Amino acid sequence: MNIELDKNRLPNHVAVIMDGNGRWAKQKGKLRVFGHKNGVHSVRETIEAAAEIGINVLTLYAFSTENWKRPKTEVDALMNLLVSSLENELETLQKNNIRLNTIGNITLLPLKAQKGLNKVMGLTIGNDRMVLNLALNYGSRSEILEAVKTISKKVVNNELEIENIDENTINNHLYTFSLPDVDFLIRTSGEQRISNFLLWQAAYAELYFTNTLWPDFKKADFYNAIAEFQNRERRYGKTSEQIKTT
Ligand code: FPP
């Protein structure tokens, strides 16, 4: 790696919106599924790159609640790719001490995908170098909505006082309850949108948009993105001077 990175200033949690598989395939005169297949190589490169530099949590937006609207053949192909990737990558996850976690309602995924996910999550539960967090059938608004409902029920049942509801209460009712906030959010393919992804968790995230299409996104691209993160000044509402003196 010839990109200079400061190991003491890494984002703790990096989230990625992997976008552009379809356009990549179209540019090559191929079907969209060809783009997804090649996107899997970028998934692998990104996981390895993140683990190698010491990122603690990597969240990948693999399938949104809106993605069900795609043609059935494409949805089926994405689910099959997920299943085969889980089978193929288990060894790499174990070797690299990576724990698999999911966010989103996975009970609505095909049984084969659920089984594969539960198997790999179970087998990697003790791994502690990095959490690979796959967002599957995930939507941020519905996640927040469900949290509001659960919290409301606790209030109605006198298990919780309204005065005691704070940001931690909300955090603890999200799929990401055990994970830190997102520090850095990457989106490929030139689109500059958040697309219902980690809206609460990315409140203070630095955003990074690159024109590179997901299947072309490789280790060096990930490191370039991290280098850019390290050039940003995170102020959390304070002034630049205040940040420099703390
Ligand atoms: C976006 O490209 C990509 C997706 C909706 C899915 C990402 C899935 C993979 C990379 C493969 C399987 C995942 C795992 C975790 C093994 P797009 O189809 O929206 O591209 P477009 O915007 O150019 O149409």
Image (spheres, rainbow, N blue to C red):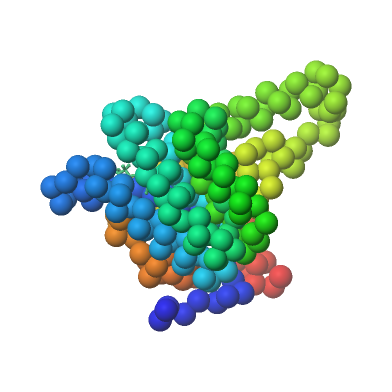
Front-lying residue, 178 or 211: 178
Q: Establish if 174 lies above or below 45.
A: above
Whether residue 122 is visible to the viewer of this picture, yes or no, is: yes
Residue 191 position, x and y percent, is: 33, 47
Quadrant placement of the C terminus: bottom right
Whether residue 56 is visible to the viewer of this picture, yes or no, is: no
Residue 150 position, x and y percent, is: 71, 26
157 relative to 60 in the view: left or right: right
Residue that appears at 46% across and 67% down: 49
Place residue 22 in its image quadrant: top left
Residue 189 position, x and y percent, is: 31, 51
Residue 69 position, x and y percent, is: 35, 27
Quadrant placement of the N terminus: bottom left
Q: Establish if 34 lies above or below 131.
A: above
183 relative to 2 in the view: left or right: right
Place residue 8 in its image quadrant: bottom right
Residue that appears at 67% across and 66% down: 242
Front-lying residue, 20 or 137: 137
202 relative to 37 in the view: left or right: right
Q: Establish if 220 lies above or below 21.
A: below
Task: State the residue lying farthest toward the top.
Answer: 156
Residue that appears at 33% across and 52% down: 39
Front-lying residue, 197 or 49: 49
96 relative to 48 in the view: left or right: right
Looking at the rendering, the quadrant in which ligand 1 lies is top left
Front-lying residue, 128 or 69: 128
What number of labels is visible?
Answer: 0
